[in-house]
Image (tube, rainbow, N blue to C red):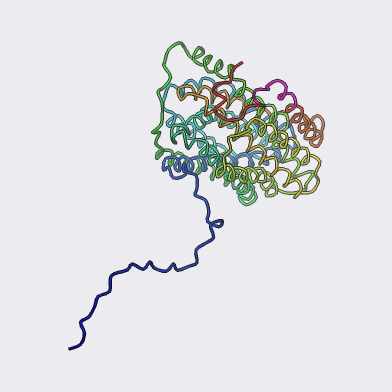
Amino acid sequence: MGEPLMLRPFRHVPPRPPHRTLPRAMIPRSLPAAWSNRAFAAFLLARLAGMFATQIQAVVIGWQVYGLTGDAMALAYVGLAQFLPMLILVLPAGDLIDRHARKPILMASWAVAMVCAVALWWLSRHAGTGEAGKATALTGIYATLALFGCSRAFSGPALQSLLPQIVPRPQLAQAIAANGMLMRAASIGGPLVGGILYAVGGGALSYGVCALCFLIGVSFLVRVETRYAGAKAPDTGGMWRRFGAGIRFIRNRPIILGSIALDLFAVLLGGVVALLPIYAKEILHTGPAGLGVLRSAIAIGEVGAGLFLSLHPFNRAVGKRLFVAVAVFGLANLAFSLSHWFWLSFLALATAGAADMVSVYIRSALVQFSTPDDMRGRVSAVNMLFIGSSNELGEFRAGTSAAWFGPVAAAVLGGVCTLGIVGLWTKFFPALHKVDKFDEATEARY
């Protein structure tokens, strides 16, 4: 007989990898933890749809109104028609948001925005010809924009105050940066698609897409869960007394007040977005698609900066970085105002967008980290009022200045004023310039 069969001890041999392993330096870092939150993902998709609709509508209205009138003042009234209703309603809206659930308020405001898009679609299809027809269409556009401003008075504070109810506090800074980056991504596609849609199908097709996007946004909001919502504000003392508490909260924190006011005056005096239809048509000699590219340039810079911040959020020297960002914003707008080359103008706008994204990130984090949940609606309403003043009222300022001095002189003056504001704020708000970490905003008082 042969020798008995001897069994060898079992030894585990790991399978060979199908591919070579990557060097450690080439392994990508994980995405921000907030992005794995399903409620936050649904919130981002809803905001993307809403922002996409808003950006398409903005570029189409600008081109359509300037095409109807050829007057810079008509563009100024586009901003004013949206700002005045928001000015009247944003403070009561903030008080309402603190005392009630924020998600239904946001859904209702977007439903009104969808109605506005449908109204603009109808005006585009049934506008008459001749001077009388143009005047009727223009009046209808301004009236619809006023209603749209009413919806924004509620949607703006609701959006800003809803995010801390969706993600836990340790993920809030990354969520703010990721949210800002993706919103700017929608700002790239919106103007591009808006210009193309208007060139292909006119205003009717463009506004139809806007209405559909708002409907999609409302459907995604249904899936958003607010697990981290705090107690609602007490329904006592009257609306103005409750809102006065929010005003005092901001006034007693110079870091928050200074950052909000810095953004207000920098964009109010230095913004050039309202002048883009004039620059596109008369200085850079391009069409509606080129106007969409110019508006998207700002968003491209914002997305690049937002993507970096979402992966590498900083929490040191935030005050100094804020002042540097606003100064770069002013210098970039100065470069755009003097440019007669399309791609140089594109690069200047992209740089301004990146600087603005850094500024928005710092300001938003300062406000969110230092505000209790039962006061976020009122504080966000004040912040929204400042933002609305800087955007819509800034469009009115830019259009008026262009009508008086010409578009180039108006843009140059705005950039110079922005740099002047940076210098003044360094003197008036030294605590803001010296702040190191976001949490310091909670303790800083006059």
Residue positioned 41% across, 26% down in the render: 230
Farthest left residue in view: 1
Q: Locate residue 424: give its quadrant.
A: top right
- Residue 58 location, x and y as percent? 62, 39
- Residue 143 location, x and y as percent? 59, 29
Q: Is residue 292 magenta?
A: no
Asked whether 278 or 373 is in front, the reply is: 373
- Residue 348 location, x and y as percent? 73, 44
For the C terminus, the quadrant is: top right
Asked whether 295 or 326 is in front, the reply is: 326
Q: Is 86 situated above or below 64? A: above
Asked whether 133 or 374 is in front, the reply is: 374
The stretch of residues the image draws in magenta is 423-433
- Residue 23 location, x and y as percent? 54, 60
Whether residue 211 sits left or right of residue 390 in the image: it is left
Whether residue 298 sits left or right of residue 120 in the image: it is right
Q: Is 91 situated above or below 401? A: above
Residue positioned 45% across, 10% down in the render: 237
Residue positioned 41% across, 38% down in the render: 224
For the N terminus, the quadrant is: bottom left
Q: Is residue 424 magenta?
A: yes
